[in-house]
Image: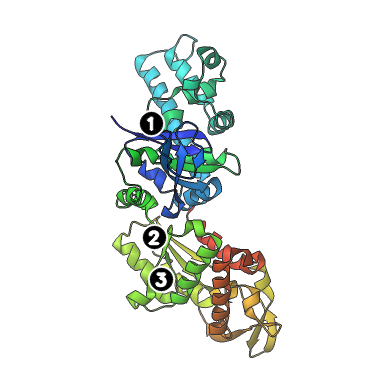
Amino acid sequence: MGTYTSLYVNDFDLAISKSAVIPEIMTVFVESDRRSLWRRTSDCEVVDGPSGDDDIERAVEYVTTGEKAIQRLDVMGFTLERCRREYDEIRNEAIQGLRDAVAEDGLASDGSDNFYAKEIEKYERLTFDEYAAAFKSVLERKLQWYDLTSEQRATLHATTSYILSDQHDDWHNFGFMCRDIRSFLRMALSVSAPDAILRQDVSGLVSAGWVRAEDPIRDDAVRLLVERYPENAPRIVLTEGSSDAEILKISLAVLFPHLVGYYTFFDFHGSKAAGGATQLISVVKAFAAAGVANRVIAVLDNDTAAHEARRALRDVLLPENIAIVHYPPRDWLREYPTLGPSGDVSLDVNSKAASIELYLGRDVLTVGGNLCPVQWAGYSQAMRAYQGEVVDKPGVIERWRAKANRCLEERTSIVPAYWADIRAVWEQIMAAFPA
């Protein structure tokens, strides 16, 4: 006899599993989402602690917001576009299979008394949008098949009836057509309330002795998946050097703390690897040749040297799990102060001198009321452009580190305008793989 554990969206029982958590579901949580508390078994009301009452139990749960869960799913590749595409593929395969059966058996594909005709009609009606709209109603009304009387079931809309009547196959309770439960979860969260709470209750597993309350249940479950599926392993971020990696790592903790652990960074210090755009391109080639299964994102500066180095990949067919991005162009960098043979002049430094320092915020780039200028250096014949570099890079980075530390210690000190550019960098990284 097993013990069941449930995943909830708010108070709606979305998925159940027996004697263990569903590993794919646990990839949406991190260990810091876990909470342990005492509650009444009769009404789940939280209480201060055990009191000798048999109605009190120790609850162990993983809890996050719907918004964070959606971002984590998107990072893993389970975007809403992917869910729709996967759903449509399976639905169309089902329709084609039914039509093939009709042709093979020599039956008519129409007629009210024809099983195949009814099934084809059902699947043709079950578009993604039709399903999503009906499931939203199921969530809002908190409908479950076993709670309804036969009279209530008879009055349900056809799609709602289809959703609720599929109760036989664990997480496939709701008949959503997908190949991974995370696609179903992503769809469900897309139609949930904006303030939805996602909660994986593992209390039953703890009380039954399947796991201990102190076990890293999430990490143990995910570890079982990592060897098989790249979606479950952290995305590897490659940068031109250790400073870029450090800045991206810290800024992730500031801007998207719930995504820490979903990205890992190449260790330049530990590997004693050389930096620079040319070296980064070599690393990309090495990863491609080695058949690394993780999703890999190589992040290049938005400058002349990086664009020139990338030309070495023109004839290289990279696998789908490796993406190349540059720091994004920014409007305010179109007129940035520069120093060169023609004197002090404001120029567009996008694609020519936009290293990561220019994305750290105007506050740390400003000294004595003036922006630290870009100094033009060597000329690239291949790109027909000069390469530039911001003056006093160490000073800019040190001022940024101090700002970042303040923000990590006290999140109310985060000024969105001063983090807009590095946020744009992270949005570029997050969008590296098409849906």
Q: Amino acid at mark 2?
A: Leu
Question: Label 3 crowding class (10 Å Cα cut-off): few <14, some 14-19, many 20+?
Answer: many
Q: Quadrant of residue 242?
A: bottom left
The residue mark sitting in front, 2 or 1, is: 1
Q: CA distance from mark 2 to mark 1?
A: 38 Å
Residue 170 circle label? 1
N-terminal of the two: label 2 or label 3? Answer: 3
Q: Amino acid at mark 3?
A: Ile
Instruction: Measure how far apart labels 2 and 3 are at the Cα level.
Output: 12 Å
The mark closer to the camera, 3 or 1, is 1
Q: Which residue is mark 2?
A: 318
| Label of residue 281 in the image | 3
The amino acid sitting under disc 1 is Asp
Identify the residue at image location x=38%, y=31%.
170
Q: Residue furthest top?
A: 113
Q: Position of residue 130 (x, y in %)?
A: 56, 29
Q: Residue at position x 67%, y 68% from top? A: 331
> From where the camera sits, is residue 435 visible?
no
